[in-house]
Amino acid sequence: MRACAAPRPSAPTITVSRRSVEPARTQHRIRRRPNITAPSASTDGASDTSSSSATSPQRVLITGSTRGLGLELARSFLTRGDKVFVTSRDAEKVRETVKALREEFGDDFVAGLEADVSRAESVEAVAEAVVDAFGGVDLWINNAGSNGYAYENLEEADPLVLQEIVMTNSLGSLLCTRQAIRTMRKTSGRGHIFNMEGAGSDGSATRKFAAYGHTKAGMAQLSKTMAVELKGSSIGVHTISPGMVFTELISSGRFAFGSQGRMFVNALAEPANVTAEQIVKKIKVATESPESVNKTLAIKILTPDVALKKMFGRFILGENKDRYYPEKE
């Protein structure tokens, strides 16, 4: 969360995650289920009218969607007339985000609920809430993830931070994929589930963020396994490779890889809103046909050709030098 992977810089290729919504936490606590922030006109969203193609409005659930790439994905879907369910571990951020998006796109198109993707009961509560709000879900995007905001060799890593990364990225993706399948079967009987890839998805080394790379390497295997388990059904499990997105997760490591690392970030990274628009456009095209659920889709943004063009612009034309921060020490 396939085509050939893009050339990998020293700086990490990371997507925004739940961790960009709130400070890193290393304790997992059992939470009571809060009240859903649901559409004010529930009769409009509660009917189980599954979208058969991307040309009609789709019901989209995005984990880790109150900030960064997740929030921009929500905006991009909403701009196209889709309905979006927002989640984050921070209940207050969910309320604030839902309120802001409703003011911009309308009450009937936005709902949300606090969720911890590493806890099965929390994920189940989110699934129940999106059915209550919209009647079901057509696109479930597992965007929530963590790198612990820490860039250090494995031998120096805090075990609690390692636990947080694995619980969020690996277990979270498994629990959410599992629940999405169950929810889709019980409602429309069809839908698409997307897991986020990142640095390490192609098996390459991820120095100073080994745990993150380790968790992302499993996304391709998960999609292949789901293709076998779901064969003959109308539910597809896919991947999104967003490339390098400039968010707090990347900026927190600006000193970890020296001048060269900052140069790669300046050259290759894109703002979250730019990447989100590219992702949503590709998803809408890829899921347009009803038969698309029978395929394993791989949405890729930073392809080798795109990366080569960006590096040519940086080295030959001097484009994007010091774009996000000074490259020299």
Image (cartoon, helix red, strand yellow):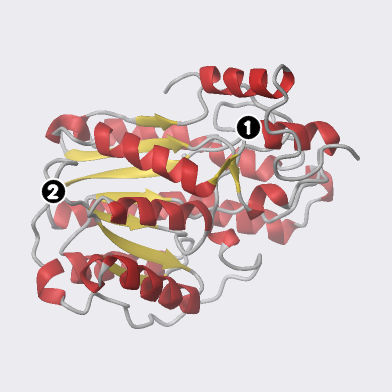
Q: Which mark is residue 268?
A: 1
* Mark toward the viewer: 1 or 2: 1
Q: Who is closer to the viewer here, 64 or 280? A: 280
> Can residue 5 be seen at all in this image of the molecule?
no
How many marks are shown on the rendered structure?
2
In the image, 173: left or right of 198?
Answer: left
Residue 49: x, y in percent? 8, 56
- The residue shown at (60%, 68%) is 22
Say which amino acid is labelled 1.
Answer: Leu
Residue 177: x, y in percent? 35, 49
Q: Quadrant of residue 129?
A: bottom left
Judge whether 204 appears above or below 133 on screen.
Answer: above
Q: Quadrant of residue 82?
A: bottom left
In the image, 80: left or right of 245?
Answer: left
User: Crowdedness of circle 2 by 10 Å Cα count: few (<14), some, many (20+)?
Assistant: many
Judge whether 256 appears above or below 303 on screen.
Answer: below
- The residue shown at (84%, 49%) is 156
User: At numbered mark 1, what does the secondary structure look like: helix, strand or loop?
Assistant: helix
In the image, 24: left or right of 69?
Answer: right
Q: Where the C terminus falls, by quadrant?
A: top right
Residue 287: x, y in percent? 23, 36
Q: CA distance from mark 1 to mark 2?
A: 35 Å
Disc 1 + disc 2, Cβ < 8 Å:
no
In the image, 66: left or right of 249?
Answer: left
Q: Disc 1 or 2, which lies upstream in sequence?
A: 2
Judge whether 23 appears above or below 53 on screen.
Answer: below
Say which amino acid is labelled 2.
Answer: Ser
Residue 216: x, y in percent? 55, 39
Judge whether 35 appears above or below 202 on screen.
Answer: below
- The residue shown at (37%, 64%) is 86
User: At numbered mark 2, what does the secondary structure look like: helix, strand or loop?
Assistant: loop
Q: Which mark is residue 51?
A: 2
